[in-house]
Image: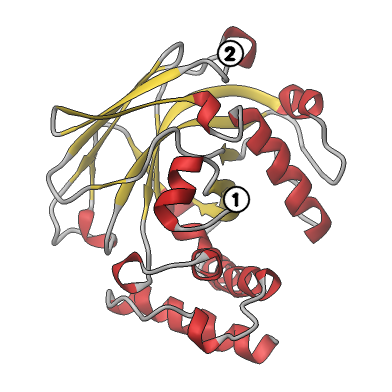
């Protein structure tokens, strides 16, 4: 398995260097096991950290029915968030570092305590959260034309691209994550509306799922780390020059500005 994993990981890493997407990985892996896909993901994370990047959190992908329908999958997945993926709101984000970006509005959990599964309950997950922030996630795919299945997106670090966090921390006890609503504006136009309940019933459930999924792999969610639980709407394409604003009830707003295509 490891030979196949290294070969696939090298293909994906090459995309970051060349900017040229590749064909789906699934046809080259007839078994297409979830275990192999996560091994491919982990090999890339190891290369990034060896090069000096730092893991700053995790994301849960494919958590809402809207996203699952859009991507043709039926289960969540997770990926790693590294320091190089985080961008300041209102500041131009180099669009050239993305291949085929889409954007999603989310609630970001910032942990104040370690969280290690298996067996984590919703109560323990809530206790581990220091505060929440409004967030936008830029998802991207190294697979040509987003022709992905669950194996492809997991191997491709859950199609991670970038993270923009709002700047107003809110206590978890001050909001009901199931009931919060959001609006997503791209270029000043209302593009979508959504609700926290679209994310596995509550974004907190996604945090529980993540802790219990990575725990058996020997991973602890660390204090200070950011967890993105999944999008409240479908993902929408964005391009250089776009300004995106998510307004989330009880949390405020977060703005992402994509800079020039030639900037990396």
Calculate the distance from the C-alpha at mark 1 to the C-alpha at mark 2.
Answer: 22 Å
Q: Nearer the viewer, residue 189 or 81?
A: 189
Find residue 176 and name its label: 2
Location of residue 176 by image quarter: top right
The foreground one among 132 and 62 is 62
Q: Which mark is residue 76?
A: 1
Horizontal side of residue 158 vs 246, given as left or right = right
Percent of width and height locating residue 261: 14, 58
Quarter of the view holding residue 166: top left
Q: Is residue 154 above or below residue 118?
A: below
Query: Does the image show residue 221?
Result: no
Q: Secondary structure at mark 2?
A: loop
Of badges 1 and 2, nearer the viewer stands 1
Q: Secondary structure at mark 1?
A: loop
Q: Position of residue 178 (x, y in %)?
A: 57, 20
- The mark tally for this picture is 2
Where does the N terminus fall, quadrant-wise?
bottom right
Residue lying at the far bottom of the rendered structure: 3
Closer to the chain start, of discs 1 and 2, is 1
Res. 118 visible in picture: yes
> In the image, what residue occupies the spot 62% across and 16% down?
172
Q: Residue at horizontal 61%, vertical 78%?
A: 32
Q: Which mark is residue 114?
A: none
Residue nearest the viewer, comparing 244 with 180:
180
Badge 2 crowding class, 10 Å Cα cut-off, few under 14, some 14 to 19, many 20 or more, is few
Residue that appears at 78% across and 46% down: 212
Residue depicted at 66% across the width and 69% down the height = 34
Residue 120 point in image, percent of width and height: 83, 37
User: On the picture, is 221 further left or further right than 190?
Assistant: right
Query: Outermost residue, top direction?
Result: 174
- Above or below — where is 68 with respect to 179? below
Counting from the top left corner in percent of width and height, residue 95 is at 22, 54
């Amino acid at each position: 398995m490891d030979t196949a994993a290294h070969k696939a990981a090298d293909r994906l890493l090459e995309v970051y260097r060349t900017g040229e997407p590749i064909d789906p990985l699934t046809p080259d892996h007839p078994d297409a096991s979830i275990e192999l896909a996560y091994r491919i993901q982990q090999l890339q994370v190891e290369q990034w950290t060896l090069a000096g990047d730092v893991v700053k959190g995790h994301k849960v992908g494919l958590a809402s029915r809207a996203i699952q329908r859009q991507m043709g999958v039926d289960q969540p997945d997770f990926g790693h968030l590294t320091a190089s993926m985080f961008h300041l709101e209102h500041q131009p984000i180099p669009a050239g570092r993305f291949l085929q970006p889409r954007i999603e509005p989310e609630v970001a959990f910032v942990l104040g305590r370690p969280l290690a599964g298996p067996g984590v309950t919703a109560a323990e997950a809530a206790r581990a959260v220091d505060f929440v922030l409004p967030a936008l996630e830029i998802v991207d795919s190294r697979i040509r034309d987003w022709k992905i299945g669950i194996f492809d997106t997991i191997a491709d670090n859950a199609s991670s691209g970038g993270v923009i966090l709002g700047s107003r921390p809110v206590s978890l006890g001050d909001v009901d994550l199931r009931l919060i609503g959001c609006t997503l504006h791209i270029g000043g136009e209302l593009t979508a509306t959504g609700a926290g309940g679209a994310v596995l019933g509550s974004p907190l459930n996604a945090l529980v799922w993540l802790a219990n999924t990575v725990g058996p792999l020997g991973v602890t969610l660390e204090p200070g780390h950011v967890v993105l639980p999944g999008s409240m709407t479908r993902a929408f394409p964005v391009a250089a020059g776009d300004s995106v604003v998510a307004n989330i009830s009880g949390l405020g707003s977060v703005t992402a500005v994509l800079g020039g295509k030639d900037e990396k």
